[in-house]
Image (cartoon, rainbow, N blue to C red):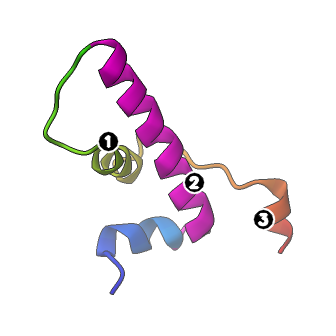
Amino acid sequence: MLNQNLSSILDKGISRYSLVTATAKRARQIAEKNLEENIITTEKPVSVALDEILENQYKILESEELERK
């Protein structure tokens, strides 16, 4: 079953592929920042990244190739 919060993003025309890719990229940024600054957290970078996307702190842009399909 799809999380209700995710369906609100997917209803805006964002593909699942774009959502997964954007979440992974943001999670890597968070993990690298935590490593550089020696920050230890209990929350996983993927969870933080997905929360940020769901809170509209980041906008996902579809690539032109995906929009044509």
- Give x and y (percent) for residue 1: 33, 87
Which of the pair 40/12 is nearer the observer?
40
Identify the residue shown where x is 31% and y is 49%: 51
Left or right of residue 17, residue 8 in this image: left
Q: Which residue is mark 3?
A: 66
Q: Which residue is mark 2?
A: 21
Q: CA distance from mark 1 to mark 2?
A: 14 Å
Q: Is residue 31 magenta?
A: yes
- Give x and y (percent) for residue 48: 29, 43
Q: Earlier in the sequence, mark 1 or mark 2?
A: 2
Q: Which residue is mark 1?
A: 45
Q: CA distance from mark 1 to mark 3?
A: 26 Å
Q: Which residues are magenta?
A: 11-37
Amino acid type at mark 3:
Leu
User: Is residue 14 in view?
Assistant: no
Kindly report which numbered mark, 2 or 3, lies closer to the viewer in this rendering. Answer: 2
User: Is residue 41 in view?
Assistant: yes
Q: Residues within 10 Å of mark 2 (few under 14, many from 20)?
A: few
Identify the residue shown where x is 58% and y is 49%: 60
Q: Secondary structure at mark 1?
A: helix
- Give x and y (percent) for residue 40: 17, 26
Amino acid type at mark 1:
Pro
Q: Is residue 12 magenta?
A: yes
